[in-house]
Amino acid sequence: MPGPLRIVRTPLELTAAMEAWKRAGHRVAFVPTMGALHAGHLALVAEGLKHADKVAASIFVNPKQFGPTEDLERYPRDEAGDGAKLLAAGCELLYAPTVATMYPPGFASYVRVAALPDLLCGAARPGHFDGVATVVSKLLAAARADVAVFGEKDWQQLAIVRRMADDLDLGTQIIGCHIVRDDDGLALSSRNLYLTPDERARAVALPQALSRAREALLAGGDVAPALATAERKIAGAGFARIDYFELVDGERLTPLRAVTPGARLMAAAVMGSTRLIDNLAV
Ligand code: AMP
């Protein structure tokens, strides 16, 4: 029987708890999140348990990765509910710092990965991935885990975190986890809570357009018409705006004119007031 979930609030406590596990001979995994946990987050915990015998998670709604007009204030928060879900999934330690602990007065250091953050989501969300790289480097430095698990749902984030962990010798292996989807194919996201029932029903056009574009490409179709058809489908379903629908190199995230090994379809579009992202390997 797992004991109660242990909650720590400072980086020193997190490091001490992780080091104690390692001294006891355990391999340790770390799963960073912003909370409002769903089955996608819990799949990351399960993935962590495949690579380690102890899993710690973090919940931190990181102000530095939200733009001035984004949903920082209304982002869903439920630490008690999240704690119960983590414990049931086999996570034993939760790091939940306050904003003042993460960014005390005088905080002045930022991590910026070159090039990757300017593409795709970075074009619509300037500064977003610098906020992500900064907080993830702090989290990984304090956690000192053997492995850290990130979702392929946020493919660009995963690519940036891999690059950063490698470049900065952080000593933690970055592991990607498959995308968990609802029965109709929509990728689970904490932001799906914002969708009205009508918007939720129409949002499924996004994963459907990705699947159809993938089929068209694998059947030998040209890239440009496959992407154009997908964009028409998404617009027709009532998405207010399409930020991008592209075929890219999965590591460099640069656009491709033909399918190559590692190619990935990437999409972001706004339904009502909610920005949804998704992607698919081709
Ligand atoms: P978030 O709480 O949205 O910042 O996400 C925390 C982690 O969970 C990130 O590594 C996400 O990629 C991952 N994640 C979010 N949604 C899903 C999903 N539907 N399937 C797999 N991983 C996910």
Image (cartoon, rainbow, N blue to C red):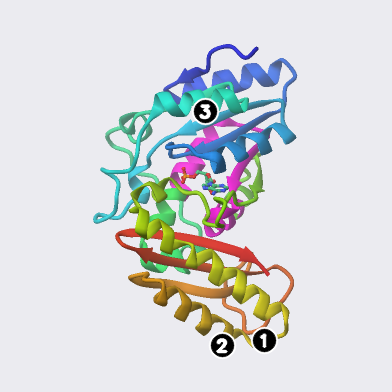
Q: Where residue 261 sits: x, y (%)?
A: 74, 71
Q: Where residue 11 sits: x, y (%)?
A: 46, 26
Amino acid type of the residue tagged 1 in the rendering: Gly
Asked whether residue 114 is in view, the answer is no
Asked whether residue 138 is in view, the answer is yes
**Element type at mark 1:** loop
Q: Is residue 243 above or below residue 138?
A: below
**Residue assigned mark 3:** 85
Q: Where residue 133 sits: x, y (%)?
A: 47, 49
Amino acid type of the residue tagged 2 in the rendering: Pro
Q: Is residue 219 above or below residue 251?
A: below
Q: Where the N terminus falls, by quadrant?
A: top right
**Residue assigned mark 2:** 225
For disc 2, the neighbor class at 10 Å (few under 14, some 14 to 19, many from 20) is few
The disc, 2 or 3, on the residue closer to the chain's N-terminal end is: 3
CA–CA distance between discs 1 and 2? 8 Å
Residue that appears at 42% across and 22% down = 9
Given contact means CB atoms under 8 Å apart, are the residues at marks 1 and 2 in contact?
Answer: yes
